[in-house]
Image (cartoon, rainbow, N blue to C red):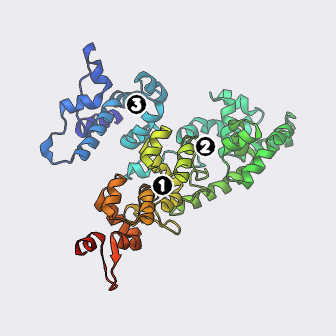
Amino acid sequence: MAIQFHQEMKDRDYPTKEPVRNPQQSNEQANPMGQLEKENPFPDPIGLTPRQRSALLRRHALHQKYDKAVALYAETNMPLKTIAMECHVSAGGLGSYLRRYWRELVLHRHHIPLEGENPHAVKIMSEGKPNVVSHARYKKAIDACLSLEDIELNVSQIARKHGVEGTGLANFMRIHEPEVIPWREKVRHWLGINDNTHRGATPACTKQYAEAVELYKKTDMTIPEIAGACHVSPSGFKQHLRFYHKNILEQKRKKRSEAQARPEKKRGELSGNGRTYKPSLRTEDKYAKALSLYKDTALTLKEIAERTHVTAEGLRSYLHKWHIDLVRERAGLSGKAEGGLDLRKSKKRMKTVAAKYEKAIGSLRKHPRPIAHAAKEFGLHPETFREYLHKHEPELANRQGMVQTSEGKRMSRQSKRKIC
């Protein structure tokens, strides 16, 4: 059924491409977009804008890239990582592509029934719940652990009996069936077959992770950050929390859900993925010098980007996302940033523009003369300079080139010379 569905969707959704057999065509394989332009799968007469057509070409190239991998996923039982290695694509990229475009195949492989639902509305893995495949793998072994027939066997022996790994079975039960192991220990103790083996966290393990657990409980630091600060293993700390501090994990899960429901993210607050909403240290280091120049100089953003060897668009995005108050200050705006404000329409006197005209304005104040003369002297456009003065220095603009007559009237110096 999965194979037939894959073939039908393949024939309907996008055209297939014959494999390139000529070694001279390796350049075309390396540049699928150029090859697609030559094939022209979306001719111009269909009335698409260049942007829409480019998006279709990218999607077409994406389908061609994963075509072989999708066929293997539908027609075999090979693991996704093995398929990715065979098709020379990343496992993460292939998994993301399958979940987005071939979700029916993913659900079929995980034995999740659709029952007329929208495939994208069906969750493959729910937070805090077992995977369908893992549950099916350990079901018989868990039933045996709850049976008095196998009460004399320990968990490792039951795992070997049912063909699963002992550590995997024990970990699965600790996380998803936490009542099974304590029940077995109580019954074995009553029957006198206890093996006197310590269960639960050892004192050494509890001491090792005590500081990390307190940090995780009282701060919004992530598990890797806490592990680094406390010099413990991130994976070991995570397992310790999952086994022995489920209540703390549940509290964190609630906080993340509340953060995800908030309409707007704020810097320094917890976000929906459990991390503090702030730029990474790598990003801060990358733009540190550029940020300093943006604060302390009147250089344009493009000039700062060239001096610090970063892209202008990346710097603009960083500033607008993490330092919007600084951007507003430079644009001559006061007060706190408001959502949806267009800085291009609301800017007043920008720091860079003010610095551009600063010397010319100072010269005009000391030596009054026509604006056009001052503009020519400092290499400025006369009309642009005049417009700037009338907007930001109206008193100075009104005085330039004008003198007061004995009768109290104001006229240009040139006109007064002509009259005299």
Identified by mark 3, the residue type is: Tyr
Identified by mark 1, the residue type is: His
Q: Is residue 126 visible?
A: no
Vertical arrangement, residue 359 with respect to residue 136, above or below: below
Task: Write down the quadrant of residue 251 in the picture.
Answer: bottom right
* Mark closer to the chain start, 1 or 2: 2
Residue at the location (58% across, 41% down)?
A: 285
Residue at the location (56% across, 60% down)?
A: 266
- Mark 2 is surrounded, within 10 Å at the Cα level, by few (under 14), some (14 to 19) or many (20 or more) other residues, namely few
Q: Is residue 189 left or right of residue 60?
A: right
Q: Is residue 340 left or right of residue 178?
A: left
Q: Nearer the viewer, residue 328 or 410?
A: 410
Q: Is residue 182 left or right of residue 21?
A: right
**Residues at marks 3 and 2 touching, judged by CB atoms closer than 8 Å:** no
Helix, strand or loop under label 3: helix
Which residue in the protein does label 3 denote?
A: 73
Disc assigned to residue 320: 1
Disc assigned to residue 221: none
Task: Write down the quadrant of residue 61 in the picture.
Answer: top left
Residue at the location (68% across, 36% down)?
A: 235
Quarter of the image that includes the C terminus: bottom left
- Mark 1 is surrounded, within 10 Å at the Cα level, by few (under 14), some (14 to 19) or many (20 or more) other residues, namely few
Q: Is residue 411 visible?
A: yes
How far is disc 1 from disc 3 in space, using C-alphas?
43 Å
Question: Between tags 1 and 3, which lies in front?
Answer: 1
Q: Is residue 419 left or right of residue 286?
A: left
Which residue in the protein does label 2 denote?
A: 281
* Residue 121 image position (x, y, % from top left): 42, 52
* Mark closer to the chain start, 3 or 2: 3
Identified by mark 2, the residue type is: Leu
Q: Nearer the viewer, residue 339 or 344?
A: 344
* Residue 101 image position (x, y, % from top left): 36, 41
